[in-house]
Amino acid sequence: MNALLNTLRGNVRQYGMIIALAAIVILFQITTDGVLLKPLNVSNLVVQNAQILILAIGMVIVIVARHIDLSVGSVAAFVGAASAIMMTQYDFPWWLAVFLGLLIGAAIGAWHGFWVAYVGIPAFIVTLASMLLFRGLTLVVLKGATVGGLPEEFKAIGNGFLPEIGPDTGFHNLTLLIAVAAVGVLIFLEVRRRNAQTAYNFEVLSFPLFVVKLALLSIVIMYFAYLLADARGLPIVGLILAGLIVIYTFIMNKTVFGRHVYAIGGNVDAATMSGVNTKRVDFLVMTNMGLLAGLAGLVTTARLTAANPKAGVNFELDAIAAAFIGGAAVTGGVGTVIGAIIGGLVMGILNNGMSLLGVSIDWQQAIKGLVLLLAVAFDVWNKRRTAGSGGAGAEAAEPSAPPPDKLAEEIEAMEAELSVDSDDPPKT
Amino acid sequence: MTLRQAQDIASPILEMRGITKEFPGVKALADVNLVVNRGDIHAICGENGAGKSTLMKVLSGVYPHGTYSGDIVFEGETAKFGNIRQSESAGIVIIHQELALIPELSIAENIFLGNETAKRGVIDWGRANREAIDLLARVGLRENPLTPVKNLGIGKQQLVEIAKALSKEVKLLILDEPTAALNDDDSQHLLALLKGLKEKGITSIMISHKLNEIEQIADEITIIRDGQSIETLSVANGGVDEDRIIRGMVGRDLENRFPDHTPSIGDILFQVRDWTVMHPQDSHREVIRQANLSVRAGEIVGVAGMMGAGRTELARSIFGRSYGSRTSGTLVLDGEELHLSTVTQAIDAGIAYVSEDRKGLGLNLIDDIKTSVTAAALKKLRSGLVVDEHKEVVVAEGYRKNLNIKAPSITAGVGKLSGGNQQKVVLSKWMYTDPKLLILDEPTRGIDVGAKYEIYGIIQELARSGRGVLVISSELPELLGLCDRIYTLAEGVITHEFDRSEATQESLMRYMTADARK
């Protein structure tokens, strides 16, 4: 029990938002008499929030790199409009329009990246300008009207579901299979990570707790899949989203590029002096945001089955709120893709739950505003609380764990390689 | 002398009794006692992490009454400060190591910030500026009070801080490392000023690592070690010298402040020829003029210069032109001419630069030890698309063990380490890039005596392994103890080259202050 409390205390920042999300789910599940988690509603939740979650992934990376992007709503609208025009007026095949749409998004992102990284204009200004610019261009492209009549294949990106396979079980088989596979991969990765950390003598969850954590995660995934399978199966946009979460989590956690993003967000000068090409990183981060804004625009247009000049209004604010609710720091250097997704889900479920309860849009806005403020306030309070435990000399009080035996040999081998004692002068 | 005055002199102005301050899991102060006599300059010495700053934060109300145990008696009354404002109104003013001035505001605005001479919310600038002139005169600073603080050098900014303290009717002035960032001239000026204030009845507490200054100025010295007050030495009684203070601080005799080292010097490894660097904003101002220097393999070469002589600028311009504009001249490393325009190229060529600004340029303070150690050589850890985290752990553990970095684990945040351990992390980071030449800019700034010794050892081992080391330092004894050869730099010009055997503090100082541009 104590161990559990300690673990929770040490990871309030990580678990806090998950607990908040669970609390909100339970709250609405009760107050809506179980409508919230009805299969069809869960399916709708995914489809309706996908574009914000896609944007939140890009936005949290931008925020970690200490920037902001206010233009994503307008860029999404513009890309949606441009692709709709391509398909309806120029009869481009849907796949070409999608490809060109993504390209336009990336190009707009590169435009931002150029001004931010190479000219040195704050991203706030650059993207504020683009917010106006592309909202205007959207109106120009659409001539102020809604453009519909899009191909079915294109609309499926926003509204479609995975095809069914196998016998009729009353559930969507493929969805369940994917979920089982996902749980398998998750368990494999978590066990591998835990083994590695134990080998390094890092602090890990006690084994029972670890099992509980994995069991809970698996149950949540399977239950979620069960709900989707009971309705229409996994939405295509859900699959896209899952793919993006995996890819971007990988990029941010495992690659050199991800390291560099966190490094420039934490201390840009120190990163520069460590040889990080900070301009290139800034450029790529902004370009990527444009790409994802383009994707969000395509998804939105497909879901609404038409390009609309008012599409994507306030998307940027929802995406930014998602990133901050999910634990990103305004000062940069802190934030995770998963956190942003959880933040986006908190917002999405609040919207959905309040709508089910018949709360008017005006009140929904007001409540979401307060939730954002409280979430960040909690984060600040939590940071201040944990900061108090340090102070000069704090490290002296804690024993320094020796490297475990298994590692000792490797370290010695490394030492021999790196040793400053070695007698050989540098190669001349 | 009246009876009242006699009593004042006899009674201490401040007594801290049995101060104990705990953080979760750490006892930062354990039963610390401090008695400061009225009108004295009282120095507090101790290694980094010994608890000096914590003690001063207790005294000034940063840690409010109730969060520590023990008593503070100030001016004969038990003080229970709830915040800094309360301690300031009692007459205790603390000047922190990092100056708390606002660069864009004027001297007068800074002096009266938070303490404005206002009538119904409207500031009387005429009066404020007049008073500012008086205050500036008291600290011997002849500047227009309307000058923005950012236009002043760091030494003058320090004086503005003291003027600000005087404006608050200070009775007890606390200075945390007041001369750490100052050159010798400014330091001497500041110390003279403190003596002047003492004659006017202002008591000072001074925290400093510069023992020669303490010896020169302090009446009493309290030594703190591992959160405990060890002893209070009275300078007037004699017998107090640097070695005596160091003995108290480290709890052992420190016979040699430098580890034994027999240099084995090889061929010329690195050369700088006709190196001229212009100021980044003003491309007609020469910051470095026609500099020539060389470093041999296995050699530790020092660069001595006053603050503003261009030492850091020289180093950073070499390090991938990370400073300056219109840089001209030649760099030769290992017989090959280098054409560097970015830091990345410099690192790839085999140059490492350990900055004087550890927190600003050296570390990402929200990172942990292992990511910090590998930050400059991530490409060595890349396998395919990903960073090899296993190898990263091995590398970081290796350095932690080798360099004796004191931390619970390599996942500990670098922001919470002491200065010495942070510096070891920075050194690890650069050692892992496997450089041929290391440029160390103030490698022991703000680091306690014990850790300094270890860092000297690391530097010597780097040289022993055949690397070239260029050390920039404000502390001449450090250069004399460490270096095989020393260049002096004045006004951006290399004025002389000394062999270890011929250099003394006096001779170095003469060339550091030479009129180089006549």
Image (tube, coloured by chain):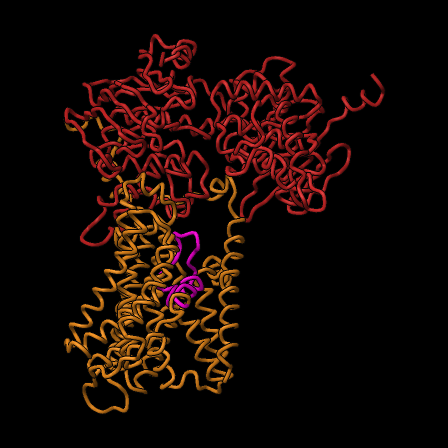
The image shows residue B244, relative to residue A308, as above or below, that is: above
Q: Quadrant of residue B443?
A: top left
Q: Quadrant of the C terminus of chain B?
A: top left
Query: Which region of the structure is painted magenta?
Result: A318-341
For the question of whether residue B113 can be seen, the reply is yes
The image shows residue A78, relative to residue B496, as above or below, that is: below
Look at the image and give the colour of chain A: orange
Say whether residue B1 is magenta: no
Residue B496 position within the rendered picture, expressed as x and y whole percent measured from the top left: 32, 12
Say whether residue A324 is magenta: yes
Q: Quadrant of residue B379?
A: top left
For the question of whether residue A238 can be seen, the reply is no
The image shows residue A331, relative to residue B147, as above or below, that is: below
Viewer-closest of A167 and A261: A261
Look at the image and give the colour of chain B: red
Residue A225 position within the rendered picture, expressed as x and y whole percent measured from the top left: 32, 80
